């Protein structure tokens, strides 16, 4: 793992980018003006997610090609905002209902071109989510002259002197989950290539409305009643004011730092074999094995007392679990936060198969009936994700953002820019075709050393 440490130490620590005057892009055709209902899943994730797409130079006249990209993307954005008109709206707090909704008002998405005097190779290993890449994404400060309510979508196109281009996308997570974001980018890029929509988006989320008469049938440990949590303890998943907060400006606590832990496909297969070697499990997926390992290694690294509950949350796709299943093109959040919770002593001391089994049980727990019950629980108690004392595993590595082609090739890498929500552990693509991944986690320095020891004890 020494080569990785060397790569981290050689990453650039400062990035100068000159951003041109931003402009608001509105749908090029008339669109419906209305209020869009947001489900309790959407409400819980009303924060900004930034992603970057790195494209190497394309064509003989590389600088001219990079210049042409800006006009083409601006035009395509105006077109894709017709079917995705809700992305050109603004978040609004409905005071009567005490919940967020999207006001589909054609206010627009913010767009800007930018320039950097470096080459893409000067950036180093772009698979490492370097915090300085935030310069490649528009921030809230760029939108202030357009009003106090920030756009739900902002896009920056940065041209490098080598002719390479980086697309920086800033989206409010309340718009949709990772799969929905991927479908948007596929549609956006298809329109840019002149090929039209691939999948028509369906943003109606009323299928997730809580019932008029609540039926809370289960214990919902994945959520906490908002009334039970002191204001200062409420995490960044929470309520209305989060939609307008600039999470990007939050920095890590001074005693924390991020580190990336790579796993090759061969290592993943070895881990799955280890999880099943005691005969407890009949099968084990790559996610099951990695999630269990992270949970166990984290619990050991932070040295939780044996009787303290160790908790891990992660997202389960519920498109096919609902009755009826969600329609093709559903454009909203259709992932449910399931949980594993066990005494820390058991998580630390029992074999990996024990933790894998808990992950599999957490996935199986998420049924149509369970999700409906949780929607009622969240509506009744204004619940938020129960992150206190635990981690949230966010799996990006199986979402194929690297396939997004706007007509100038596929990106050499695409992924998120890290924020300071230290409860989040990211599973990222390693930019290769070896079925491997990168585990990205923030811990205190001494805990990181222990985590590395436990994570690679295969």
Image (cartoon, rainbow, N blue to C red):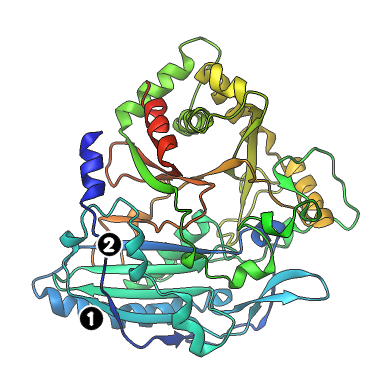
Asked whether the viewer can see residue 198, the reply is no
Residue 350, by quadrant, is top right
> What is the tally of numbered marks visible in this picture?
2
The C terminus lies in which quarter of the figure? top left
Q: Is residue 456 above or below residue 73?
A: above
Task: Check the image and name the residue furthest to the right.
Answer: 213
Tag in front: 2 or 1: 2
Element class at badge 2: strand
The residue lying at 64 percent from left, 53 percent from top is 326
Task: Check the image and name the residue furthest to the left.
Answer: 60
Indicate which disc, 2 or 1, sits on the residue closer to the N terminus.
2
Residue 100 image point, x, y percent: 70, 70
Question: Which residue bears the numbered disc 2?
Answer: 54
Residue 430, by quadrant, is top left
Would residue 210 appear left or right of 344 to someone viewing this image? right
Question: Which residue bears the numbered disc 1?
Answer: 68
Badge 2 crowding class, 10 Å Cα cut-off, few under 14, some 14 to 19, many 20 or more, is: many
Element class at badge 1: helix
Q: Is residue 73 above or below residue 190?
A: below
The residue lying at 68 percent from left, 68 percent from top is 240
Residue 384 image point, x, y percent: 70, 53
The residue lying at 66 percent from left, 70 percent from top is 241
The residue lying at 52 percent from left, 10 percent from top is 279
Q: CA distance from mark 2 to mark 1?
A: 16 Å
> Which residue is more in the foreground, 318 or 352?
352
Would residue 165 appear left or right of 258 to someone viewing this image? left
Residue 405 image point, x, y percent: 31, 63
Q: Is residue 156 above or below residue 350?
A: below
The N terminus lies in which quarter of the figure? top left
Residue 439 image point, x, y percent: 40, 40
Q: Which mark is residue 400?
A: none
């Amino acid at each position: 793992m020494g080569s990785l440490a060397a790569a981290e130490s050689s990453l650039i620590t400062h990035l100068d980018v000159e951003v041109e005057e931003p402009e608001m892009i509105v749908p090029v055709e008339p669109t419906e003006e209305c209020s869009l209902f947001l489900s309790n899943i959407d409400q819980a994730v009303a924060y900004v997610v930034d992603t970057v797409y790195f494209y190497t130079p394309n064509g003989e006249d590389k600088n001219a090609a990079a210049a042409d990209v800006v006009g083409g993307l601006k035009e395509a954005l105006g077109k894709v905002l017709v079917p995705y008109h809700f992305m050109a709206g603004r978040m609004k707090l409905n005071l009567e209902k005490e919940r967020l909704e999207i006001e589909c008002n054609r206010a627009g998405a913010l767009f800007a071109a930018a320039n950097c005097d470096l080459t893409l190779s000067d950036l180093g290993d772009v698979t490492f989510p370097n915090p300085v890449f935030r310069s490649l994404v528009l921030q809230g400060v760029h939108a202030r002259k357009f009003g106090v309510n920030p756009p739900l979508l902002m896009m920056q196109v940065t041209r490098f002197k080598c002719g390479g281009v980086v697309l920086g996308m800033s989206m409010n997570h309340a718009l949709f989950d990772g799969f929905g974001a991927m479908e948007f980018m596929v549609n956006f890029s298809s329109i840019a290539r002149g090929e039209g929509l691939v999948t028509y988006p369906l943003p109606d989320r009323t299928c997730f409305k809580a019932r008029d008469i609540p039926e809370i049938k289960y214990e919902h440990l994945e959520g906490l009643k908002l009334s039970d949590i002191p204001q200062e303890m409420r995490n960044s998943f929470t309520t209305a004011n989060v939609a307008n907060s600039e999470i990007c400006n939050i920095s890590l606590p001074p005693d924390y730092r991020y580190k990336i832990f790579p796993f090759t496909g061969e290592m993943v297969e070895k881990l799955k074999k280890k999880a099943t070697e005691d005969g407890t499990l009949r099968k084990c997926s790559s996610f099951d094995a990695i999630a269990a390992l992270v949970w166990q290694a984290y619990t050991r690294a932070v040295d939780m007392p044996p009787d303290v509950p160790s908790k891990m949350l992660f997202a389960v796709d519920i498109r096919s679990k609902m009755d009826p299943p969600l329609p093709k093109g559903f454009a909203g959040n259709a992932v449910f936060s399931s949980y594993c919770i066990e005494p820390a002593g058991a998580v630390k001391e029992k074999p990996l198969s024990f933790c894998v089994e808990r992950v599999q049980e957490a996935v199986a727990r998420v049924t149509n009936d369970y999700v409906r019950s949780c929607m009622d629980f969240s509506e009744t108690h204004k619940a938020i994700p129960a992150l206190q004392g635990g981690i949230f595993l966010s799996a990006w590595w199986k979402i194929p953002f690297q396939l997004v082609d706007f007509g100038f090739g596929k990106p050499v890498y695409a992924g998120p820019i890290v924020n300071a929500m230290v409860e989040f552990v990211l599973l990222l693509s390693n930019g290769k075709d070896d079925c491997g991944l990168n585990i990205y986690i923030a811990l205190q320095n001494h805990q990181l050393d222990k985590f590395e020891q436990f994570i690679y004890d295969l």
